[in-house]
Image (cartoon, grey):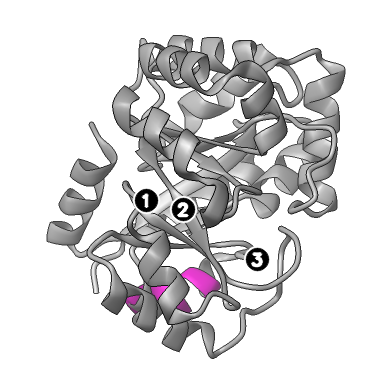
Amino acid sequence: MALKEVFDTLKREGKKALIPYITGGDPTKEKTIEIMDFFAKEGADIIELGVPFSDPMADGPVIQRAMERAIKSKTTLFDILEIVRKFKKQAKIPVVLMGYMNPFFSYGFERLIYEAKESGVDGILCVDLPYEEAYPFWMCAKRGGLDFVCLVSPLTNRSRIARIKRYASGFIYFVSVTGVTGERESLPEDVKGMLIDTKNLTKLPVVLGFGISKAETIEEFFDFTDGFVIGSALVRRLEEVSFDVESKGFKDFFYALERACHKKR
């Protein structure tokens, strides 16, 4: 199922997309596939798979630790694509690669897009790629048939969003706060107005990410977005249970997120 189909279905059903994030290879490649399988079977709509990088400047300490574990397990970008290939043999939900320009550039845009598409990747998001430098990568993704997910933030003005949306496909990722990834007790109230403004400027779904730590935040912002990316909160809980997705504490937390996203209003 393509990203557009997922969002169209959820919209008809009055639900929001649950998009869990994990770093590929954290703590091992085999465990990553096991965790992705759990997400797919238990209600995730899309999986965001992080590509390990030694200098993840947009990420807070939880995701930094995940990157370090993945690098320690010698996970490469090639391995990430193999993880997706194996996962897609038994699951149909979309996978979006999220990473930094250095690994993507080193791998080669043409090679990356071709192999990513062939492995089953549906979309790609480059955290540190500014709009002004995006054309070569965007063109490769477009030719290769991958959605090109773009970020906007509270600092992105309306005219810049209007330019960014020319490249964006799949969905727009709205970064809730300035700074790095990580759990927040609450999100700024004015994010709601920014989400409304962004949705008025694009026909694409707009997904909220960064700082979402609990189901109550999803319920508070439910009416203002099309989905939620949850990263640090999930990864921290996975750390606490030694990456055992069958542990009650982790399952209860994930199910609470699932209910909040899929509860009809």
Q: Is residue 22 above or below residue 254?
A: above
| Kind of element beneath mark 2 | strand
Left or right, residue 4 beside residue 61: left
The answer to whether marks 2 and 1 mark residues whose Cβ atoms lie closer than 8 Å is: yes
Label 3 – label 1 distance at C-alpha: 25 Å
Residue at 27% from the left image edge and 78% from the top image edge: 200
Label 2 – label 1 distance at C-alpha: 8 Å
Look at the image and tell me whether residue 94 can be seen. Answer: no
Pick the front one: 5 or 102 = 102
* Residue type indicated by callout 2: Cys
> Residue 155's image quarter?
bottom right
Q: Earlier in the sequence, mark 3 or mark 1?
A: 1
Pick the front one: 77 or 20 = 77
* Residue type indicated by callout 3: Gly
Residue that badge 3 annotates: 211
Q: Quadrant of the N terminus?
A: top left
Q: Which residues are magenta?
A: 217-223
| Kind of element beneath mark 1 | loop
Pick the front one: 106 or 63 = 106
Q: How many marks?
A: 3
> Residue 72's image quarter?
top right
Label 2 – label 3 distance at C-alpha: 18 Å
Look at the image and tell me whether residue 75 can be seen. Answer: yes
Residue 75 in magenta stretch: no
Residue that badge 2 annotates: 150
| Kind of element beneath mark 3 | loop
Q: Position of residue 178 (x, y in %)?
A: 69, 72
Q: Earlier in the sequence, mark 2 or mark 1?
A: 2
